[in-house]
Image: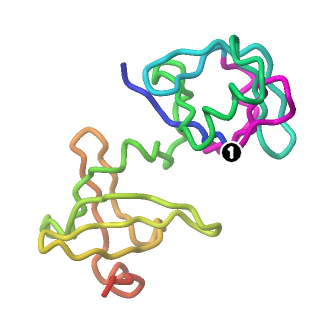
Amino acid sequence: MDYIVVGEVLKPQGIKGELKIRPFTDDSARFRKLRTVYFGDVPYKIISCRIDGFVYIKLDGVDTRNAAENFVGKEVKIDRIHAVSPKEGSYFIVDLIGCDLKNESGVTLGRIKDIDNFGAADVITVETPEKKVFRFPFLNRIISNVDIDSKTISVVEKELSAVSVYED
């Protein structure tokens, strides 16, 4: 099955097995529509969901704080068929990781290894063919084309070189 990570369990909440989740979505209300989430390949039915800055869910069969402790640090996943389609110009991070990064001439600059969000913009981590690592913000002036089907992201090299940060 093809999964999408929608959050991470931060800690148990209370004594009855509720989980506090940091959502990885721009609309936490989407959690209210979910009926099942996955940890690894194991499905869990959602009994209740509330949102208060973070997302709090109660899973069927997880009835104590001790049982909830086993989920701390784990990714909350859904199957792709239950995911909403991203808006135009938006993408699932899982679809961008592994894409080749190319310049305007089609020369491969590296492969996307990770994407983090530190606030203002997503930050893309790229590993070059020479195994060097650099990062740059995911901005429209840098990204000229995203083709998920061919796993390729094209960039304006002049703009990329102005903002890229290389690791030592």
65 lies above or below 117: above
Query: Residue 27's quadrant in the figure?
Result: top right
Is residue 26 part of the magenta span, yes or no? Answer: yes
Q: Secondary structure at mark 1?
A: strand
Query: Residue 10's quadrant in the figure?
Result: top right
For image coordinates 32% across by 76% down, the residue present is: 134
Q: Quadrant of the N terminus?
A: top left
Is residue 11 part of the magenta span, yes or no? Answer: yes
141 lies left or right of 50 = left
13 lies left or right of 59 = right
For image coordinates 55% across by 38% down, the residue present is: 74
Q: Quadrant of the C terminus?
A: bottom left
Q: x, y (%) of residue 42?
A: 48, 17
Q: Disc 1 marks which amino acid?
A: Leu
10 lies above or below 117: above
108 lies left or right of 119 = left
Front in this rendered view, residue 61 or 109: 61
111 lies above or below 64: below
The number of numbered discs placed on residues in the rendered structure image is 1
Q: x, y (%) of residue 95?
A: 37, 42
Q: Which residues are magenta?
A: 10-34
Residue located beneath label 1 in the image? 10
Q: x, y (%) of residue 89?
A: 49, 49
